[in-house]
Amino acid sequence: MKNFILINQKINNYKKNSINVEGDKSLSIRFVLLSSLSNGKSTALNLLKSEDVNSAINCIKKLGIKINLNNKKCEVFGKGLYGFKPKNNLVLNAGNSGTLARLLASLLINIVCRVKITGDQSLKKRDMSRITKPLKKFGASIKDNKGKLPIYFNKSKNLKPIVYTENLGSAQCKSAIMLAALKVKGKTKLKCLPSRNHTELMFKNVINVPIKIKKQKRYDFIEINGCKEFKPFKYKIPGDISSASFFIVLTLLSQNKYLYIRDVNINPSRTGIIKILNMMGAGIKFLNNREYKGEKIGDIYIKSRKSLKSINLKPKFNSSAIDEFLLIFLVACRCNGISTFRNLGELNKKESKRLDWGIKILKLMGVKVKRIKNNGIKIWGKSNFDLKRKITIKNFLKDHRIFMVSVVAGLSMGGSWKIHNPDSFKTSFPLFLKKLEDLGAKFR
């Protein structure tokens, strides 16, 4: 297979107006990890079969947990909070997944032998000190590489609950502390900035462990009573709103199109992109709303818009849309006026330096864009923006979102695109190109 795809024309009329996207990646990884700690067989339907989730499955298998996976379901045969049986000097490879590396580390704080967590070249550049610091406070015996992977775990002694303040607004950091607390006797208390709350919802509504959550104006306060074994569970994973976002923006920026995206996780901590796009005039609607084990599920309706408004976005919206900002930048290109975004330094701590890449892609497209203080950017947009140039996207550390955003830009805005590393999207959305082809997109 060629190491690039070519896009030379916009997507024409959709062949269909309703799609489903694959299972939520965050929930899929959490299912694999939490079910491994239960006592018995847990089952998931619609588990995302991506490279990141496969990495989670492979790591848990190496820790001595049996897992059966087929097209319909995933079965995990958990052995309780202390059931891992690793070999000494075991190596666990998290691949490209920061979520997996950080949450998996929390499960190893009571390990009885030497275990190493590593990842691919992109993951090795990412900050792990945000989780090793609190895990060491628990008493975990950890050696890291100047805050980066690989991380080495040795037998720990005298683990104890902690009181910790999380000031990054990182759901991964918060979740790592929560998972570690399960294995430590006593009450762990966590003060944290609001972020995605999938772990809290699963604790409360799926595995039913003792947890108290108090929300105040700026911080959430979480208290977990550890060392409580829990029963196996069944879980049906809804569609991933991050995956749905690519089709939302494609439809919004194309001409004379509408689309229903069915059975999507519309957890309010994940729908920042919808709030932001609607402030820009997108008119996106949630239909058929319901609740499943604490998570909100619904259908998303979107149609093309000829006129969109520029935005001066308040940073309070950043955390609920952090994975979708490159798509939001694309929409800003089609808004009349100047859009401003601030405090996006967290983007440069992802699989690639996404803020830098967002600016680079816009400049390649011929969009006027300026970097401003406080890790922000200004984008000068216009409603009739249309590409006529050739663009090559490469050397982006195989970041799946860089690839997929570039594809959406080519299909909705025109131009001639040569996009390298066409397998990169398989870390999070293996059916991405097929779903687009089913709608009518053409690639070479």
Image (cartoon, helix red, strand yellow):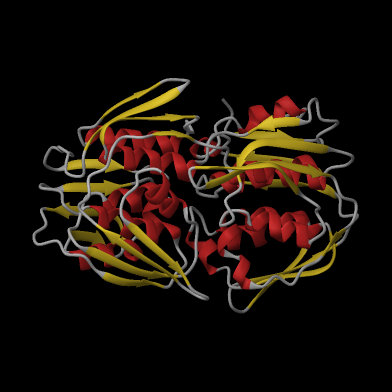
Q: Residue at x 85, y 45 (%)?
A: 304
Q: Position of residue 404 (x, y in %)?
A: 63, 43
Q: Is residue 359 above or below residue 419?
A: below
Q: Nearer the viewer, residue 268 or 47?
A: 268
The spot of residue 325 in percent (x, y) is 64, 58
Residue drawn at 18 percent across, 53 percent down: 153
Indicate the quadrant where residue 158 lies: bottom left
Q: Position of residue 210 (x, y in %)?
A: 31, 55
Which of the 4 image quadrants contains residue 38? top left
Find residue 323 and report its horizontal and vertical position in percent.
Answer: 57, 54
- Count of labels shown? 0
Quadrant containing the N terminus is: top right
Identify which residue is drawn at 48% across, 43% down. Answer: 293
Residue nearest the observer in this picture, 9 or 307: 307
Relative to residue 399, is residue 331 drawn left or right?
Answer: right
Q: For the view shown, which residue lies furthest in the bottom direction?
A: 373
- In the rendered image, the quadrant that contains the C terminus is top right
Residue 413 in view in this figure:
no
